[in-house]
Amino acid sequence: MFLSKKMLLTGLTALLCVCSLRAQTPYWQQRVDYTIDVSLNDQQHTLDAFARIIYYNQSPDTLHYIWFHLWPNAYKNDKTALSDQLLENGSTRFYFATQEERGYINRLDFKVNDQHAETADHPNYIDIIRLMLPTPLPPGQKVTITTPFHVKLPEVFSRSGHGGQRYQITQWYPKPAVYDRDGWHPLPYLDQGEFYSNFGTYDVHITLPSNYVVAATGQLMDESEKNWLRSRSGFEWIPERRKEKARSGAIKTVTEKFPPSASTQKTLHFREENVLDFAWFADKRFRVLQDTCRLDNGSIVSLSSYFIPAEAPGWEKSLTMMRQSLLARSRWLGNYPYSTLSIVQGPSGNGGGMEYPSIALIGPNDSEGLLHYTISHEIGHNWFQAIVGSNERSYPWMDEGLNNFYDNRYSTQIGNGKGEVKFGKQQIPLHAISNALVETSASLYRDQPIATPADSFSQVNYNLDAYAKTAMWLEYLQQVMGTAAFDAGMKSYVAQWQFKHPAPADFKEAMEKAAGHSLDSAFSLLHASGPLPYARRKGTQAGFPLSPAFWSRYFKNRPAHTLLLSPAIGMNTYDKLMVGALVTNMGLPMPRFSFLLAPLYATGTSRLAGNGFINYSIYPKQALFYRIDAGVSAAAFSINDFTTPENKKLHFGFHKIVPSLRFTFDEKNARSTRERYIQLKSYFITEQGLRYSRDSVFTGTDTLLVDNYGKRSANRTLLQLKAVWQNFRALYPYKAEFKLEQGTDFVRAAFTGHYFFNYANGGGLNARFFAGKFFYTSSKTFSKQFATDRYHLNMTGANGQEDYTYSDYFAGRNEFDGWASQQIMERDGAFKTRTDMLAEKVGRTDDWLIALNFSTTIPDQVNPLNLLPFRIPLKVFADVGTYAEAWKRNANTDRFLFDAGLQIPLFKEVVNIYLPLIYSRPFKDYIQSTIPKNERLLRRISFSIDFSNFSLRKINRNLGF
């Protein structure tokens, strides 16, 4: 559509007028006051409550409705935003939770100024509703909203819930969303991504059994309860154990983790002004320590620490940690404005660490220093976001990042192991490790801009960029401004926006005012990915990767280049023990040009062996491919030996050189767990084998035949194209791989698919599908068939000789008896029953082959290996397949083959041991005809060793960046 000059000018004028009016509109914010009466049923784990909410419309707009958060409904079913995000972040626990384990809020009956009010569901989220006001609410007026409500508390999957009769009651009541200068902010509850709430006064009465200790936001108003809490300074609960007769008649030991609840009830009154939220925690086992802290302005803050002594080592010093942290933050950011400050020992895992106004939940820590660091961090959140109420969901850096900056300052100034992790006898600062990981993520182009909303961050980037990278950026901003101006700006920012809702522009304005000049360049970095400006690193550090002293030096003063040197060992049947070194330059951050070399000396052959690679990575920006890798790998090992009649040992080896290109597709969504790539490889392989000849020697009267034994070498080339599409998602992960290989006289095509079906109680069923086709590039002859034998499709997993790319580790690659001969690799049909002693293995074909493989975990309670003092997992496997020869007219085999049995997966399935128990007729005939009856059990066993199964993602799915 054509726009005239006049229309453009008119539109521009209107836009400027709107912007001008917005700029001139005085700041305003809504206010919400709460009076809540709530009772806890600790047998049903429920709350019954009545809320009286006074909503003050201090905006310039007339309101016709108010969005309400019903965040307990986030735990109602597996279709909530919380459930989806937990799955995306790798946890299936809530998805498979039972109804009993989940929670909800119901029995709501809203009235506005005593008039019944209708509600409307949010179109996408069941934990948000719209309350329709019976009459419009004009500016400067208020309404009183009342409702009863009932909450079923979930088990602790995120922040709120219960673990037995340990309660952490957070985000538990109907709560109006924020309406500010940018409009409404209805937010579904999320685990990754915090809150944005209105300031107001909370007046809360809590009724529960009288032997519960309650820690809550604000001031406890009951003097008798205060006196009782003082008596808990030496309290300790020891779990009671008793013998009980089971239905089976067996005697079992039952442990009572909680004291019985009192038959009497008590009602506690808590009150606080100018807070964003109200949280409370209840447990009958808490010890309570109390003290006071005088701030520099003379204010007295009451300190309380609630913990279970048997579960919380180091907490006896928690009041000292609180006092030091409170004083430091008050001096840096302005005095703490509330009269109470409490910390509560939280459980391990979900919900174990979280801040709320004037109270924080502290998760378990491995050392006293880390406990101190965590206490300081959670106390610091009283400034960001309890006092300065920014939108944590949209701008997580404004609370987590700013707070993390002061964590680093605190640990540096206080020292003595605060905020440090122990490695051997060395202490390494957490922020030094975090900074290295931030730079590594940036070097891999996996980072995201600091200004990214919380729910758009990948899980790893939420921890790296919203926290650590923001702290690094603030260090840079401090350098730009100077420390004095920076500190003045931060104090001014907190003072100006205390109990208000600042946006990023407000923070920038406060810092520019303190700096006295524009900070556009520094603040533009908030919206950019990539490394932050920092001093250019110099030099090279070389060291032993298992040395704590090396890593301590490394993280405290990271160099431009890294060289890691380590002893390396290897072993196989022919080379015997191999010793050597591992040399690599792969440090943090990762260099674009990387190498890893592992030269080894083989004691069994007195030859050099080893492997290694070099690689160069290219990161095209705004392109189809995220990363392009060009590299070369090489390897050389012994693969067989032969002893001549003269008792001379001949060793045969291989070496290979493999240039490769890998194109990894870009995934536009940073939270995606999908990976897609195309890989091209050329294998240049030289193999040694036995050379045998017989000479005739004439001695005048006789002719002697002399056997000659030696080595021969053969070269071959294989071209390989591989396309992979896989998803590492927590629920039903999958992988699809198409591989096309071409060698002399043949082309081999194969498709392999993996799909994992999760079980609700953990574990699952892995299904594998394989389809392969073998082609001769010219007419098929006996000689070609014989020459390409090792490339043919196999129903049974390939043996060492059939590993034609030397990609898997084999203990005895060409052994034909003994335990090493029982090793297989997962390829083609991947059956576990071997028929290596046949000239023509069962299920081998140079045409086509199709197979299905299943492997399922079994519950621990039916695993007979659980009788051992250590845990060994057990699986059941089953394979079924067919191949071309089985469908020929005069085939002497079954059309479909099968086997099934037990599988023991070890070391994250790097090693798998298989015992086939049932199998089809051809396998049965083979076993009965070739293996003595007394050896059949052990010789049926197969095993695989696949180091490609080892992945950092199996340890932590985020380690793959």
Image (cartoon, rainbow, N blue to C red):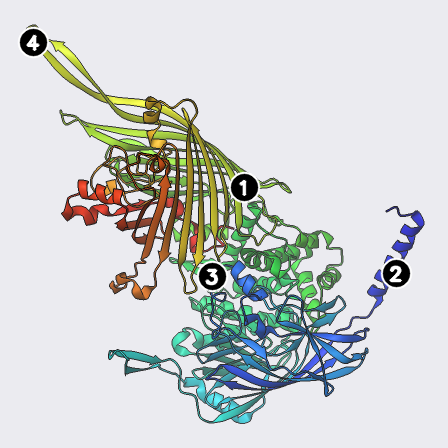
Q: Tell me the kind of residue under disc 1.
A: Thr
Residue type, numbered disc 4: Asp
Residue pictured at 26% horizontal, 45% vertical: 921
Is 877 positioned to the left or the right of 515 in the image?
A: left
* Chain-order first, disc 4 or disc 3: 3
Measure how far apart labels 2 and 3 are at the Cα level: 54 Å
Query: What residue lies at 49% left-to-right and 50% top-to-bottom?
Result: 960
* Mark found first going from the N terminus, 4 or 2: 2
Kindly identify the amino acid type of the residue bearing the numbered disc 3.
Answer: Glu
Could you say which is closer to the camera, residue 511 or residue 134?
Answer: 134
Callouts 1 and 4 close, C-beta under 8 Å:
no
Mark 1 lies on residue: 664
Residue at (74, 75) in percent of width and height: 65
* Label 1 to label 3: alpha-carbon separation: 37 Å
Q: Which residue is mark 3?
A: 420
Task: Tell me if I can see residue 20 in this picture.
Answer: yes
C-alpha span from label 4 to label 2: 119 Å
Which residue is under mark 4?
702
Q: Secondary structure at mark 4?
A: loop
Q: Amino acid at mark 2?
A: Cys
